[in-house]
Image (spheres, rainbow, N blue to C red):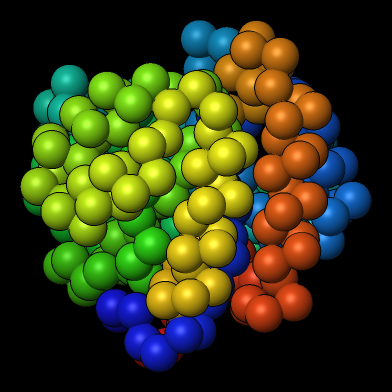
């Protein structure tokens, strides 16, 4: 599932199921981009109603994010298994569509949780690995999706910590080359240019509530416009389509 030639894929994903996800959906529609929304049924923050989830699923992909936005590594194995499997079943009941992809709350998981995701019937899982232009990697027959940029003004140190924690040397090279930081749109533009040259996958992700709190809506609009411009030389995919691409 690695990068081949100069083929470029573009995808976006959005976590936590906040009602402001509908504003994300409007921007994606404006720019003609796909999006996968990872939605828990309950959370400490507001979540979309079942009717709003159903409406969103008419134009965008819905992925699972556990039932209660539960950090899997803090749960017993039985509890974690239930959170994963029930989130898929509940979302499929709401949307009437297959739920094919999963996202780990707060990006925390172990190998056993990847196996649970596979056993629940998902084909892929999204991580919070940053600064990657890699296509999904197979793990326990699940397509594990890294990401490129988070739609949030992170510090350069946060990017380094993210790469070092996962021993991703390609991400470290991208950090050294592009020096990401609070201006995440500059990083988006630089890595889009890089991806056009080398091929691979560009994956933007974020949280609508976090974008709102940080006053990043105009910045996000600019980043999505850049992705829309790049799509002329790329294939735009949902997260599940990304996982199936090239198989």
The residue at the point 23 percent across, 32 percent down is 160
The residue at the point 33 percent across, 49 percent down is 177
Residue placed most toward the observer, 140 or 231: 231
From the top left corner, tell me how far across and down residue 195 is, in percent.
48, 68
Residue 222 showing in the rendered view: yes
Q: Quadrant of residue 51?
A: top right
| In the image: residue 98, left or right of residue 166 | right
Give above or below for 11 relative to 210: below
From the top left corner, tell me how far across and down residue 186 is, in percent.
57, 40
Residue placed most toward the observer, 215 or 193: 193
Pick out the residue farthest to the right. Answer: 30
Residue placed most toward the observer, 176 or 88: 176
From the top left corner, tell me how far across and down residue 35 is, in percent.
66, 53
> Where is the N terminus found, in terms of image quarters?
bottom left
| In the image: residue 59, left or right of residue 85 | right
| In the image: residue 206, left or right of residue 25 | left
């Amino acid at each position: 599932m690695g990068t081949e030639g100069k083929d470029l894929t573009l995808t976006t994903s959005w976590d936590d199921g906040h009602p402001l996800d509908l504003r994300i959906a409007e921007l994606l529609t404006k720019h003609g981009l796909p999006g996968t929304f990872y939605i828990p049924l309950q959370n400490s923050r507001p979540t979309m109603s079942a009717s709003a989830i159903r409406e969103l699923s008419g134009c965008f992909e819905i992925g699972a994010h556990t039932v209660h936005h539960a950090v899997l590594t803090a749960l017993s194995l039985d509890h974690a298994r239930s959170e994963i499997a029930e989130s898929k079943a509940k979302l499929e009941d709401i949307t009437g569509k297959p739920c094919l992809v999963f996202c780990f709350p707060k990006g925390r998981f172990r190998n056993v949780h990847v196996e649970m995701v596979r056993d629940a019937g998902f084909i892929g899982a999204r991580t919070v690995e940053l600064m990657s232009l890699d296509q999904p990697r197979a793990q326990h027959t699940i397509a594990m999706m890294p990401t490129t940029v988070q739609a949030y003004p992170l510090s350069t140190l946060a990017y380094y910590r993210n790469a070092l924690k996962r021993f991703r040397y390609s991400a470290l090279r991208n950090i050294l080359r592009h020096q990401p930081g609070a201006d995440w749109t500059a990083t988006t533009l630089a890595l889009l240019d890089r991806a056009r040259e080398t091929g691979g996958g560009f994956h933007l992700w974020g949280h609508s509530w976090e974008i709102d709190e940080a006053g990043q809506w105009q910045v996000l609009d600019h980043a999505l416009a850049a992705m829309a411009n790049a799509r002329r030389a790329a294939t735009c995919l949902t997260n599940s389509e990304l996982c199936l691409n090239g198989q």
